[in-house]
Structures are given as C-alpha cells and as structure tokens.
Image (cartoon, helix red, strand yellow):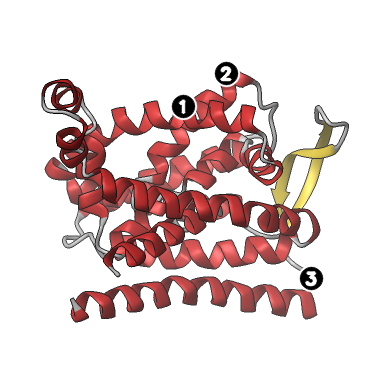
Amino acid sequence: MHHFWLFLKGIAMGSADVVPGVSGGTIAFVTGIYDQLLGSIRKVDAEAVRLLFKQGPKAAWLHINGTFLVILGAGVLTALLSLAKGIHYLLVHYPVWLWAFFFGLIIASVVHVGREIRQWNAPTLLLLAAGAVVAGWISMAAPTSIEATPLVVFLAGSIAICAMILPGISGSFILLLMGLYEPILGALKSFDLGIMALFGAGAVIGLLSFSRFLSWLLAGWREATFAILTGFMIGSLVKVWPWKETLTTRLNSKGETVPVYQQNILPDIGTDLLLALLLMVAGLATVLLLEWVAKRQGDAD
C-alpha cells in the first residue's frame, strides 16, 4: 500500500509538471516527500558508483533509495504521457479556459509557498519584489515560440528539471517562458523519441547537478529562497493571463502559424468570462484540496 500511495504521489507530481501552474516540487512538498526526494537524488553520486563495483548492485540501490525513485518516477512518467495529448488539445481549442485554470493554480501556489516565510521583514519583501519583477519582465520579454533545435531541447531539459524540483516554480512554466512548452508537449503527445531522449538527457544532467546546490541553498537561506520563489510565481501571472492579443506571428517547421509576441488585454464581459472565472476558482480549489488530503494522510500516519 505504501508503494501504491507513492506511485499516486508521482502521478500528482507529473500532472503538476505537465501544466504551467503548480510545480512537481510543490506537490512533493505538500505530500511530505520533498526532503526524501531531494536526499535520494543527491545520493546518486560517486559513492553510489563505488558501492556498485565493491559491494554490488544491491548496496548501490539501497544507497540511492532506488525503489523510492523508481516508483515515484514511474508515476511521474505515467502522468506526463497520459495527460500530454489532452493538454495539447485544450491549448489549441480552448486556450482561454485552460490558462484561466492555470492562473488559479498559481495563485493557490503563491499562498502555499508563501506560508514557508515565517518572518516578513524588509529584506524578505525586497527579495519577493525582486523575484516578481524579474519573472514579470521575463514573461513580457520572452517570445511565445522558438524553434526546438537539438541543442535547445537539451538545454531546456537541464533548466526545466531544476524548476520542477523547486517548490513553487513549474518546469512547464520555464518551458513556457523559453517558448518551448508547446513543442515539448507536442513531442510527448506524438511520442517523439528523439526529442524526448534529448530532453531527458538534459534533465538527468540538470537534476544531478542542481539537487546538491538546492540542498545547500535551502539549508542556509531557506526563507530567502522561498521569498524569491514566491515573488517569481507572482510575476509569472503576467505570462499565464488568459486574455491576450497576438501582435506578431510566424510559421514553424511544420508550416503552422504560431504567435511570437502577445500582449495582455482585458476580457469581454459575457458567458466566456464567467466560465473562465469559475475555472480560476477550480484551479485554486484543486491545490487547496490536495493540501487537505495530504494533511489528512499525514495525520493518519
């Protein structure tokens, strides 16, 4: 039963990572496995290799907490592959409603991650404001779509995976800022093994290198780190604002017309606006419900 619940947590993490809203790191955080996840990733090191050759695969497997990583990873991969097609369809046919739901997810994440900040003072507020300004500036400056060359896909994997294990920053949102969200989502949807392998290779390298830095950062400057992450999420709301006007477009490698630069606009009052607002509330409620379920499970344990 423990392994089954771990698999479900992996599915929840993967579901979060496939949408530019709640991060997989946030899900790991609220479900109580974040420290174990970070510690297990950090142990994939030279010591694990030494144990593999001197004491055998079992010793190395125990050292890296291999069963935990495999079951959790299987859940994440299951969610990524199963949800990609549906999300891609919604992006094409119902973008406003989908982004409205994502908007609500991020608002709830701001509240959750912000709770980790125990002392609100001038330096904390300054870091929060800096994170919001930087994310807002990147959101407005970044193109909506760029060409997914092999090198770009590899680097995107390295960068996005770092965000995926950060509580508060969605790896999908980083891809969105880089203009690679739809190309990577499309690769998952069509099961493009070439792009998936390049992205995965970059993700492995980024994950192994960044986990150690993140552990050091949270150990020494936990509240400062969470202040920046909270600010970053606030600034990211500029990018996921559902109502946009396309200023320029271009043809991608498949001959499809895709937007390059867009600006946020106010919505028209009507049924569509009401539904979008309801979806925002649904997104917010989803995160709050997940927190409640995780707390109940923790109390039961």
- Where is 293 relative to 222, above or below? below
Residue situated in front as seen by the camera: 159 or 15: 15
Tell me the kind of residue under disc 2.
Answer: Leu
Compared to 153, does 211 lie above or below? below
| In the displayed structure image, the side of residue 180 where residue 92 appears, left or right | right
Q: Quadrant of the N terminus?
A: bottom left
Count of marks placed on residues = 3
Q: Quadrant of residue 267?
A: bottom right
Mark 3 residue element: loop
Q: Which residue is mark 2?
A: 151
Residue drawn 11% across the image and 22% down it:
54
Q: Quadrant of the C terminus?
A: bottom left
- Which residue is disc 3 drawn over? 268
Q: Secondary structure at mark 1?
A: helix
Tag 2 secondary structure:
helix
Is 260 on the left or on the right of 21, as rendered? right
Position of residue 22 measured from the top left corner of the image (x, y, whole percent)? 46, 58
Q: Residue at x 48, y 73 (%)?
A: 286
Q: Which amino acid is tagged 3?
A: Asp
Residue 225 in picture, x, y percent from top left? 26, 46
Q: Are marks 3 and 2 in contact (CB under 8 Å)?
A: no
Label 1 sits on residue: 202
The structure residue drawn at horizontal position 25% and vertical position 58%, both measured from the top left corner, is 33
